Image (spheres, rainbow, N blue to C red):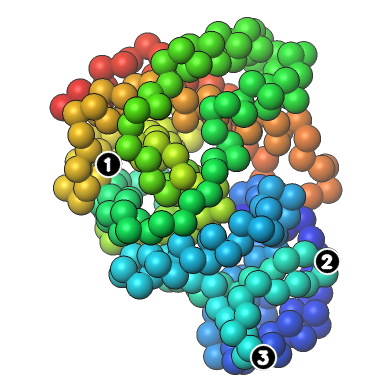
Amino acid sequence: MAVYTKVRSEEIDAFLTRFDAGSLVSAKGIAEGVENSNYLIETTQDRFILTLYEKRVDPGDLPFFIAMLDHLAEKGCPVPPMIADRDGIKIQQLNGRYACLIKFLPGISLTVPTAAQAEATGRALGNMHDALQDFNAERPNSMNHDTWRTLAVDCGPLELDNIAPGLHDLVEAELGFLDTHWPDDLPKSVIHADLFPDNVLMLDDHVTGLIDFYFSCTDVRAYDVAITHAAWCFSEDGVQFNPAISNALIGGYSEAFNLSDTERAALPVLARAAALRFLLTRAYDWINTPADAMVTRKDPTAFLNRLKFYQANPDIFKA
């Protein structure tokens, strides 16, 4: 989440008149994340999230996201559906951007999760995958491994090496490894593809919300587990690996949804892929984020450290 498009309070209040949502009491921009412009809205009736979709979200994908969130909500998963206006319309326009008013979910996102919280998150991810088994809509992964070489080129060799000496060569070698070892034969489904701790809301050890589904797509299901593992099982800088968090996360997932022996065997490669994917997107954002954007840039070397760990420790996923 972030704020790229500024919206005045008067404009938000006028926007709310399309809904049965009360009138505006307060609006606060949310700086975390890098994808869309987000405001926490409090009205005379409730609290909401107002999202304006920026460059990385194709407006043509919004019906897919709406259908997926509605499906998950109907299955009892803790997700925030988008709210329809009085005419039944969920996709709006505001200040030249497509926009949606979204249900606010209680809970806080974690900075340093416990093993119990990781287990609950793994279980919630497994329940989500189970709920999506009969969801038939598909969306190609716009950030799949076939796109990463282009992303690396767009970053530039000099710029990558400015982030960390030798990074360009390391990235090239890893791209070659993944081209050779990517497991195309694993089961696919719709996945979250971005389940970082700041996209999970919790109260104590209970998951109250899975949020920010705008990378959701159809891809290898176990890749979603690997992404979540890379996001949850390390210190913020990626230097320290936490085996208790790792075991809890995989254990919680396996309790809710079967992780086959073949999928588990592929996790070392998929985890390397997850680390490289976020290394490259963070590097691109680090290089290209506008200086005046109200957004928190994220250090790409945190995922360089994760990648090096996964390269050196392929046995951590063994049961």
Left or right of 27, for residue 253? left
- Image location (x, y in percent) of residue 68: 46, 62
Q: Residue 101 sits in which quadrant? A: bottom right
Task: Give, as a three-letter code, the residue at label 1.
Answer: Leu
Residue wearing tag 3: 23
| Alpha carbons under labels 1 and 3: distance apart | 41 Å
Q: Which of 80 and 44 is in front in this view?
A: 80
Q: Which image quarter is the N terminus in?
A: bottom right
Q: Which image quarter is the C terminus in?
A: top left
Instruction: Find numbered disc 3 in the image and state the secondary structure of the residue it sits on.
Output: loop
Q: Which residue is drawn at 83% across and 48% down?
A: 292
Give yes or no for contact between labels 2 and 3 (Cβ–Cβ under 8 Å).
Answer: no
**Which of the two discs, 2 and 3, labels the residue nearer the N terminus?**
3
Q: Which of 1 and 184 is in front in this view?
A: 184
| Image mark for residue 301 | none
Q: Residue at x 53, y 66 (%)?
A: 66
Q: Residue at x 17, y 47 (%)?
A: 255
Task: Give, as a three-letter code, the residue at label 3.
Answer: Ser
**Which of the two discs, 1 and 3, labels the residue nearer the N terminus?**
3
Label 3 crowding class (10 Å Cα cut-off): few <14, some 14-19, many 20+? Answer: some
Residue wearing tag 2: 96
Asked if residue 274 shows in the view, the reply is yes
Q: Residue at x 63, y 80 (%)?
A: 89
